[in-house]
């Protein structure tokens, strides 16, 4: 079963401990997390269901490519990391 991790920066704003979740895509995995933690949805996704601009998700070290539909596949033993992306110069 995939495991999802949230960085300490995100956990500072909303309780989101690491956990094992079910899902074959990033969207399904997030849906499993949102079922237990609905407040997290609005923090990660915009009103269109897209990943917010200053967030990144990595599946086994690879950044997700579908930020709108969240259709990237998630292997059964994947490690998923959700973090705030840095910007600026």
Image (tube, grey):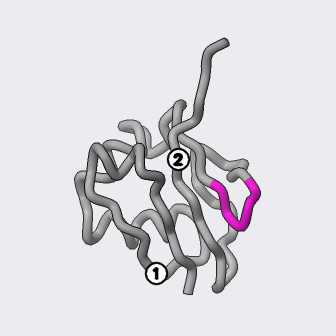
Mark 1 or 2, nearer chain start: 1
Which of the 4 image quarters holds residue 36? bottom left
Eyeballing the image, is 30 above or below 64?
A: below
- The residue lying at 72 percent from left, 48 percent from top is 65
Relative image position of residue 10 (x, y in whole percent) = 39, 47
Asked if 2 appears above or below 43 in the picture, the reply is below
Crowd tier of the residue under label 1, counting other residues whose Cα lies within 10 Å: few below 14, some 14–19, many 20 or above: some
- Vertically, is 41 above or below 55? below
* Label pair 1/2, CB-CB below 8 angstroms: no
Q: Can you say which quadrant of the picture contains the C terminus?
A: top right
Residue occupying image coordinates x 36% and y 37%: 47
- Based on the picture, tell me whether residue 47 belongs to the magenta stretch: no
Q: CA distance from mark 1 to mark 2?
A: 17 Å
Residue 37 in the image: x percent, y percent? 26, 63
In the image as oriented, which residue stretches furthest toward the top?
89
Give percent across and percent down for residue 48.
42, 39
Crowd class of label 2 (few under 14; some 14 to 19; many from 20; radius 10 Å): some
Q: Which residues are magenta?
A: 58-62
At 53% from the left and 76% from the top, the residue drawn is 3
Q: Secondary structure at mark 2?
A: strand
Prevalent SS, magenta region = strand
Q: Please, which residue is most extreme toward the right here?
A: 62
* Residue depicted at x 63% and y 60%: 71
Quarter in which the N terminus is drawn: bottom right
* Residue that mark 1 sits on: 20
Q: Residue 81 at what x, y percent from top left?
A: 57, 59
Q: Secondary structure at mark 1?
A: strand
Is 60 a magenta residue?
Answer: yes
Look at mark 2 in the image and give the residue it sits on. Answer: 83
């Amino acid at each position: 079963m995939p495991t999802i991790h949230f960085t300490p920066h995100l956990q500072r704003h909303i309780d989101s401990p690491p956990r094992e979740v079910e899902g074959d895509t990033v969207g399904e995995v997030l849906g499993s997390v949102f079922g237990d933690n609905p407040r997290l949805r609005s923090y990660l996704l915009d009103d269109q269901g897209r990943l917010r601009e200053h967030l990144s998700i990595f599946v086994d070290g690879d950044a997700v490519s579908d930020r709108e539909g969240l259709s990237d596949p998630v292997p059964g033993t994947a490690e998923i990391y959700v973090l705030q992306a840095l910007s600026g110069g």
